[in-house]
Image (cartoon, grey):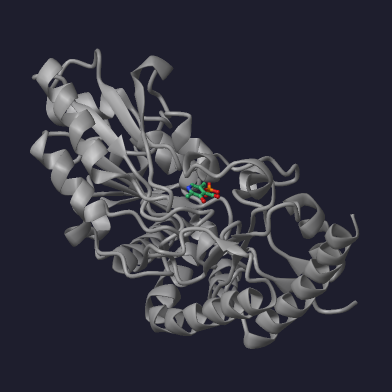
Amino acid sequence: MTKRTYLDHNATSPLRDCAKEALVSVINTVGNASSIHQEGRKARAIIEKAREQVAGLVNAHPKNVIFTSGGTEANMTALSPELVAANKKADVNHIKLFISAIEHPCVLSGGRFASEDIIQLPVSGEGVVILSELSEKLGEFRKQNPETPFLVSVMLANNETGAIQPIAEIAQIVREHDGLLHTDAVQCAGKIAIDCKTLCADLLTLSAHKLGGPQGVGALVLGSGKTLIGDHLMKGGGQELNRRAGTENVAGIAAFGAAAEEAANELGRMADIAKLRDKLESELLVEAPELTIFANNVERLPNTSCIAIAGMTAETTLIALDLKGISVSSGSACSSGKVDSSHVLSAMGVEGDLLQSAIRISLGWNTTETDINQFISAWTGIYRKFKSSREAA
Ligand code: PLP
């Protein structure tokens, strides 16, 4: 079988060797971390080491890291009117959620907020939240509701375009109006430096499988040890300091910790990944000057490229690339399998043929120059065929 070229790290990143080793070494651990005997204490020590490793990746206090079953659960936990009410010591009624139009579907659904309490924030043509709109919307809300708390949820970077959002500025605006801020940092961890202290978000979401850890593990990171969960999504035992019930996934958590530590140590490598991504884009532009690169004029994740040639449909391109041994995606992994048009690009004002033609190439910790050359050569072949059939039509 020929070697495949995997360029879909934003969907899921292959398991790092260190994570695999941690997983295998812990899988036979007998103890329940809540037990006080020796086996239980051993499981507890494994979890606490991983908590420190994950906290280290985002410069948080380990006590503020709550392990979950993934990014989706962490987001669902954060998006709760009860959580906002508990932290602001307010009545739970009429609490509003402000979210950007480009959030991952698990945030876009609003978590535990009723749909009538969710307000969407527009983005620019480059896919970045418009700060003046946010300021205006929050100011208006505050004028009409002087006492009612609110939550703002804006991702740190978008999974489809890689556009990085101005979270520190957003945090300042949210604070001015006495709200809470959640940021979904799932796509950023291990790709850019994240410092919880300077971001000033009240809640931050991570997912292990986007940085070379296993699928099915994530974390909700609290901005402060005093942040309350309010209404638990997972009710039951007192695990995770009474903040998330359920026996911990010890092996998954250990592997998440190992991947997080390695990702933090290797952040410097992301400059090389950015060079590979830039080489890919510039070579495609030489071949096809009509190429659109989305979010090209704003700060982007170093690993992500979202591109389109109007009329060269994503579905056909993905299948043709797959047949040539190359894996990329058309957008959010959760909507692939079937190629839907992207709500992210729609929110950026992209329409028609261009909207149906966007593909996402996402590099990661094990991407090499050979992978990029393979992609360029395969894509160029597909493009040339498309161009000659267009000219013949
Ligand atoms: N948030 C973003 C931005 C994502 O890209 C994803 C996964 O695609 C998630 C959340 C969900 O994370 P998980 O797959 O760990 O549930």
Q: Residue at x 63, y 86 (%)?
A: 369
Image location (x, y in percent) of residue 232 = 35, 29
* Residue 284 can be seen in this image: yes
**Does residue 147 appear left or right of residue 14 in this picture?**
left
Q: Toward which corner of the image does residue 342 lie, by quadrant? A: top right
Image location (x, y in percent) of residue 291 = 62, 65
Asked if residue 79 is positioned above or below residue 366 in the image, the reply reads above
* Residue 251 can be seen in this image: no
Image location (x, y in percent) of residue 267 = 40, 78
Q: Residue at x 43, y 82 (%)?
A: 271
Asked if residue 316 is positioned above or below residue 103 in the image, the reply reads below
Asked if residue 100 is positioned above or below residue 363 in the image, the reply reads above
**Does residue 111 appear left or right of residue 27 in this picture?**
left
For the residue pair 78 and 166, the one nearer the viewer reads as 166
Q: Toward which corner of the image does residue 234 lie, by quadrant? A: top left
Q: Quadrant of the N terminus?
A: bottom right
For the residue pair 253 and 127, the one nearer the viewer reads as 127
Q: Residue at x 41, y 64 (%)?
A: 297
Image location (x, y in percent) of residue 296 = 46, 64
Q: Residue at x 75, y 45 (%)?
A: 337
**Does residue 359 appear left or right of residue 142 in this picture?**
right
Q: Quadrant of the C terminus?
A: bottom right
